[in-house]
Amino acid sequence: MIKTLGYAAHSATASLDAFHFERREPGPQDVQIEILYCGVCHSDIHTARNEWKNSVYPVVPGHEIVGRVTQVGNEVTTFKAGDLAGVGCMVDSCGTCPDCHESLEQYCTNSPTFTYNSPDPHTGKMTYGGYSQRVVVNQRFVLRVSEKLNLPAVAPLLCAGITTYSPLREWKVGKGQKVGVVGLGGLGHMGVKFAHALGAHTVLFTTTPGKAADGQRLGADEVVISKNPEEMQRHLGSFDFILNTVAAPHNLDAYLELLKRDGTMCLVGAPEDPHPSPNVFNLIFRRRRLVGSLIGGIKETQEMLDFCAEHDIVSDIEMIPMQKINEAYERMLRSDVKYRFVIDMASLK
Amino acid sequence: MIKTLGYAAHSATASLDAFHFERREPGPQDVQIEILYCGVCHSDIHTARNEWKNSVYPVVPGHEIVGRVTQVGNEVTTFKAGDLAGVGCMVDSCGTCPDCHESLEQYCTNSPTFTYNSPDPHTGKMTYGGYSQRVVVNQRFVLRVSEKLNLPAVAPLLCAGITTYSPLREWKVGKGQKVGVVGLGGLGHMGVKFAHALGAHTVLFTTTPGKAADGQRLGADEVVISKNPEEMQRHLGSFDFILNTVAAPHNLDAYLELLKRDGTMCLVGAPEDPHPSPNVFNLIFRRRRLVGSLIGGIKETQEMLDFCAEHDIVSDIEMIPMQKINEAYERMLRSDVKYRFVIDMASLK
C-alpha cells in the first residue's frame, strides 16, 4: 500500500483538512500518477457538504486530475513512467454492459466507479479523489494529455470540459447553427469556447451585465442579459441548441421559447431543488426537446482533449494551494472565480 | 355565400346549440365538402369552454372531418365531386415559411389557420369547424380518404390518429423496440394500434385495471397498471420510446425512469395546469429526452391515412347524433367512451 496525503471533509459541516490514507499498489493494468494539479468542481462542494444526500465520510473530492505517470503495471501498453496523464470523473466501469461497449461508461448499466465517494471494489471502502498526492487507476480510465497546453489549465477539461463538449457533439452543433450557452461559470465558459470552436454562432446568456466583455473574449458572438425580457424576446424561436449550465433552479420556459422548431435545450446543471415545471405547450407547439447529459465517455474525453490541443483550448483558471480550499469553496458559492480554481499539489509537499 | 347549419357554444358555460352561419363560395383552389361524420376531440371541449383562454364565441368545434366532395374550384386538380375527403386540424397556412416548405404546416412560423377558433382571412371572423353540414377548404389542406375503411371510424384519424402517428414516425419507432403508450383514451388507443402496426413491442400504461383486456385487443403486448409501483419497477430503464397521451397533470418521473439511456418520452397531451416538475437527474443520468409533438403536417397526415388503409386501422368509435353532443362531453369528462365519439351529420337534416 502507498501512503498518501490528501484533503478530506469528515462531515457535512466540517472544513476540509489534511487526511492520511493509502492507495493500492498498482496491479498489472494500473497506472500510478503523481498528481500535479486538480481542478475544483461544484460537485466537490455538493459532495463534501452532503447536498446530494449520498456522501460517505471521509470525502476526498477532486475529479479534474492531471499529473505525471510514475509507475505502470506490466500489462499497461499505452503509458510509461514520465508521461503526462489525466483522470476525470470515473476510474472504472463494468466493461461488459451495452453502455460500456458503446464507450459510454458514464451511463454504465452497473454504474461506473466514480473518482470519489463511490464504492471501491479494490478497497471495500469509498474511492478517494484528486485532492491528494497521487492516484492509482486502471489504464482504461487514464487519458493522454498533450505537452503543449498549459498543464494546470488542462485539469478542468476532465470534468467541466467534457461535460460541455459531449452534448455539443451529441446534438451535432456546428457551422450555420445558432447556439446558446446559459451561465458563465466553470461549465459555461468552456461551453462558450467549444461552441465557438465548433463554428456555431454562439450566444452567451448571463444575469450579470459585467460578464459581457469577458463572454465576448471567450468566444461569444453575442451576449444576452437574461434578466432583460426585451433582449430575450428578440431571440424568440431562433436557436438550434441551448446548453444550460445553471445548477440553480430557474425558469426553463424563458429559454425553451427561444428554440426553433425541433430545437434542443440540454441541461447539465443538477439543482438541489427542482426547476419550476416547464410549460408543456412550449414543447408541443414547436416539437422542442428538453434533454440532459452527464459528462462523457472515456473515448470522447480523449477526443475532447485532442480537440483542445488542436484548437489551443484550456480553461481560464486561478491557482490556489491546497490549504486555501475552504476559502475557495466560499468564493465559488459567491461566483467569485474566473472561471475555475485549480489546486497546485506542490503545496502538499 | 352558402347557408350552413352547425352547432356552436356561445359562451364558456353555455351548452352547444344549433347555429346558422355562412360558408364562403368555393374559390378556384377550394374544395366544398358535405360533412358526413365528425369526430369529437377533447380540444373541442377545451375550446367550447374557453379552458385555454383563447376562445372567441360563437365556437363551432370539430376538426376530425370526413365527407364527400360536392363542388371544386376550377384550379383544383386532385379532387372531383363525389370523392371522399377528409379535413383535420388545419385549413390553411402561409405556404412560404421554412416549416411550410418542409410540409410541417402545423409549426408554420406565421401560424396555420386552424379549423376552428382561428382568425379566418376569408371572412375576417373566426373559422368554424366540423360540427356543421359542410365546409369549404383550400385543396392543399384536403386529404384523400380510402373507400375501403369504415368511414365514420376514419374521422378520428384526422386528429387523434395523426397526433399519435407523427411522433412514432419522427422518433423512428419500429421493430426491435420497446414502446410505451400512456393512457387509453382517444389518443392512446390509436397510439397502441400504430405502435403495434409499426412492429414495436407495445406496452400500455393505464390506471384502470378494467382496461387491460381491451388494451391487449387493440394491440398491446403488455399492460402495466401504472398505480402499482412494483409493476412499474419491473420496467425500469427498458423503454426506447414512450408516447404520453395523458392531458391531466401527473408525475412524469414515473415514466422517465422507465426509459433506456437515450430514450425519449413524447408528450402529446396539453394539461390546463402544469405537471409536477420532472427531476433533472432522470434526464441527466441516462441522457434521456422529454419532448412534445403537435398533430402532423398535411403530407404526413396523408401518409398516415394511406398506412391505415393498408393496415386496416381505424378508430374505435361510438356514433351519436348532433343533438347528443352536450351529453357526450359529460361522458368524455368521465372517460366513458370507447374510444371516440363521432357525430353522424345526417342528424342535422
Image: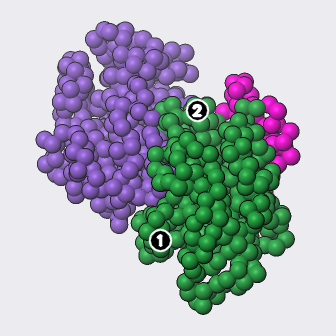
Chain colours: A purple, B green
Q: Which residues are magenta?
A: B209-237
Answer whether residue B220 is magenta in the image. yes
Which residue is nearer to you in this view: A165 or B65? B65
Which residue is nearer to you in this view: A186 or A310? A186
Horizontal relation, residue B320 to residue A211: left or right: right
* Image quadrant where one finds the N terminus of chain B: bottom right
As helix, strand or loop, the secondary structure at mark 1 comes to loop
Horizontal relation, residue B146 to residue A166: left or right: right
Which residue is nearer to you in this view: A309 or A285? A285
Chain ID of residue with mark 2: B
Q: Which mark is residue B325?
A: none
Q: Position of residue B87 (x, y in %)?
A: 64, 68
Horizontal relation, residue B27 to residue B71: left or right: left
Q: Position of residue A149 (x, y in %)?
A: 25, 47
Q: Which mark is residue B250?
A: 2
User: Which amino acid type is shown beneath numbered disc 2?
Assistant: His
Find disc 1 in the rendering and name its residue.
Answer: B123
Query: Which residue corresponds to the image point at 18% horizontal and 39% vertical from the top-left?
Result: A208
